[in-house]
Image: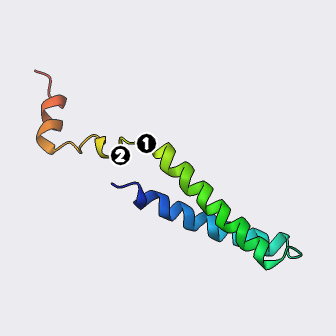
Amino acid sequence: MKKSKVVIPIMVVVAVLATWILQKDHSEVPFLHKLLITVGACIVSGGLGYVLLGSDVQKVDPKPNQQDVNKKGSRK
């Protein structure tokens, strides 16, 4: 799984939430400032997600197959 498959949805969710909160609670803020806040939030959340996700995304343990499960479960 690539980092972009996780980072981009995080950025979209942050953009939607930031827009919703700014529209609901802070209607007196000018549109340009709302846009800058939303873009900044997306960039920061994307950067944090990219860094915190780490480089070991490809090193996830493989799913065990049925033969491995049966061998480990039988004790004779």
Q: Which quarter of the figure has residue 13?
A: bottom right
Quadrant in the picture for the C terminus: top left
C-alpha distance separating marks 2 and 1: 7 Å
Secondary structure beneath dot 1 equals loop
- Residue at far bottom of view: 31
Q: Position of residue 1 (x, y in %)?
A: 33, 54
- The location of residue 28, given as percent across then percent down, is 89, 75
- The amino acid on which the numbered mark 2 sits, given as a three-letter code, is Val
Identify residue for label 2.
Answer: 57
| Horizontal side of residue 68 vs 24, given as left or right | left
Specify the amino acid type for callout 1: Gly
How many numbered marks are there? 2
**Residue indicated by mark 1:** 54
What residue is at 50 percent from the left and 64 percent from the top? 9
63 shown above or below 74: below
> Are there few (<14), some (14-19), or many (20+) residues within 10 Å of tag 2?
few
Question: What's the residue at 14%, 28% (across, down)?
Answer: 74
State yes or no: discs 2 and 1 in contact (Cβ < 8 Å): yes
Q: Dividing the picture into quarters, in which one does residue 17 lie?
A: bottom right
